[in-house]
Image (spheres, helix red, strand yellow):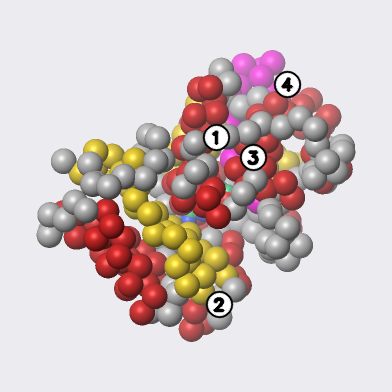
Amino acid sequence: MEIITDVKTMRQKVAEARHDGKTVGLVPTMGYLHEGHLALIDAARTQTDVVVVSDFVNPMQFGPTEDYQVYPRDLDHDAKLCEEHGVEYVFAPTVEQMYPKDSRQVDVFVDVRNLDNNLCGRFRPGHFRGVVTVVSKLFNIVRPDKAFFGMKDIQQLRIIEEMVRDLNMDIDIVPVPTVREPSGLALSSRNTYLTKEEHEKAAAIYKSLQMAKQLIEEKGIRSVSEIVKACSTYLAEKGFKVQYFQIVDYDTLQLMQETKGKIIIATAVFLGKVRLIDNLVMEVQ
Ligand code: AMP
């Protein structure tokens, strides 16, 4: 396994692989790898010949008051896990390699509309512009046959699926289910910010999503406002500051009044200063 820090070498390595008739899988990450990322890597390992894991904390997707500077980083640990999971290349570029101009000064970027009106997009202006821009850059550098994204970040996954369609990118986007702790808490690099007590408490996030599912499936409730109210109240009572609890249509990511068809139930909460997200996808008859 090799760690590559510059764009030119990365391009050469994947060109060689492609020349040898090999397929290339890309797993974009911001590093500080955990079992969730490893599920993506393992999927890439079984579906493509050469696996590239990008490990880059992208400044462009962080808001001015967000945690870019303190976001956890540990390339040695990441490289070790990648090696154990059969990755060929860890692409860990410098910010200067990815953004020859300052990331806040770029004149040309990729952007999103409508799909970022709700969920995280509503509360993180410019976040998805940063995500789709950096993912486009990574796609241009690595030119993967397949790219693997976690359902943990469902809005990101849906936007990238639409991006490859809208921009005619010849890349298969492979969704990978969310990996959870036994308590139900979705694994996240940001979980490291939590105290032991907060960590235990955080299991209630997934419980709130399951509660919504039960209200729909078992109680037959269809009114989104009723479901949202019950679940937000539950989270608030548990001590979370609820940024949003929303139910949106899976395809359009738009809010709905009545649950119907394929839906995403999603929430973002603060536990102290830590912001955590989770979601559940279900089909309503
Ligand atoms: P991040 O490093 O947080 O940007 O995540 C990189 C990729 O890993 C994204 O596609 C995430 O959706 C995915 N991911 C993060 N946490 C999980 C998880 N618990 N289960 C599955 N995928 C995950």
Mark 4 nearby-residue class (10 Å; few <14, some 14–19, many ≥20): some
User: Label 3 sits on what residue type?
Assistant: Arg
Percent position of residue 237, x then y = 36, 79
SS label for mark 2 = loop
Instruction: Please tell me which residue is depicted at 50% across the width and 22% down the height of the picture.
Output: 165
Q: Which residue is mark 1?
A: 113
How far, Cα to Cα, is label 3 from label 2?
Answer: 27 Å
- Dot placed on the residue nearer the N-terminal end, 3 or 2: 3
Mark whose residue sits in front, 1 or 3: 1
Q: Is residue 142 left or right of residue 100?
A: left
Answer whether residue 46 is visible to the viewer in this image. no
Percent position of residue 53, x then y = 64, 42
Specify whether residue 63 is painted magenta: no
Q: Which residue is mark 2?
A: 272
- Dot placed on the residue nearer the N-terminal end, 2 or 4: 4
Percent position of residue 117, x then y = 50, 43
Q: Which residue is mark 4?
A: 15
- Dot placed on the residue nearer the N-terminal end, 1 or 3: 1
Q: Which mark is residue 129?
A: 3
How far, Cα to Cα, is label 1 from label 3?
Answer: 9 Å
Specify whether residue 21 is painted magenta: yes
Determine contact: label 1, label 3, CB under 8 Å.
no
Considering the image in quadrants, where does the N terminus appear?
top right
